[in-house]
Amino acid sequence: MSISRTERQTVSVPGLDRPIDVENVMAEIEKGQQLASHFPDAAALERARRVLTGEISEEVAMREIREAFREA
């Protein structure tokens, strides 16, 4: 599912002159993982997106990961 250009989300990151495009960064994250022979599932990618946008902290994301593996 692609988001139209007018709906694309950007976030401001301290230390950068301009906002980053969330979709572009997510594509880079996913491709980087694939090139390393890792294939993150939808939940992992959504968690990464939530960290990137500041919706959750890295600590909360790590807690979610630990809980997911505890249930497995």
Image (spheres, rainbow, N blue to C red):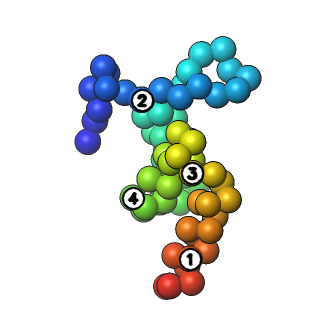
Q: Residues within 10 Å of mark 4 (few under 14, many from 20)?
A: few
Label located before the other in sequence (2 or 3):
2
Q: Mark 3 highlights which residue? A: 56
Q: CA gap, disc 1 to disc 2?
A: 29 Å
Q: Position of residue 65 (x, y in %)?
A: 57, 69
Q: Position of residue 27 (x, y in %)?
A: 45, 39
Give the residue type that dot 2 points to.
Answer: Gln
Instruction: Write down the residue under mark 4.
Output: 42
Q: Amino acid at mark 1?
A: Glu
Local crowd at mark 3 within 10 Å, few (<14), some, or many (≥20)?
A: some
Q: Earlier in the sequence, mark 4 or mark 2?
A: 2
Disc number placed over residue 67 in the picture, else none: 1
Give the structural element (helix, strand or loop) at label 3: loop
Tell me the kind of residue under disc 4.
Ala
Which quadrant would the N terminus be assigned to in this image?
A: top left
Of circles 2 and 3, which is in front? 3
What's the residue at 42%, 29% (across, down)?
Answer: 9
Give the mark toward the camera: 4 or 1: 1
Q: Earlier in the sequence, mark 3 or mark 4?
A: 4
Q: Assess whether mark 4 and mark 3 are in contact (beta carbons under 8 angstroms).
A: no
Res 67 quadrant in image: bottom right
- The answer to whether mark 4 and mark 2 are in CB contact below 8 A is no
Residue 8's disc is none
Q: Residue at x 73, y 23 (%)?
A: 15
Q: Secondary structure at mark 2?
A: loop
Quarter holding residue 42: bottom left
The amino acid marked with disc number 3 is Ile
- Give how far apart the Cα atoms at labels 3 and 1 are: 15 Å
Q: Is residue 2 above or below residue 6?
A: below
Q: In this view of the protein, can residue 2 be seen by the observer?
A: yes
Give the spatial CA distance, label 4 vs label 2. Answer: 19 Å
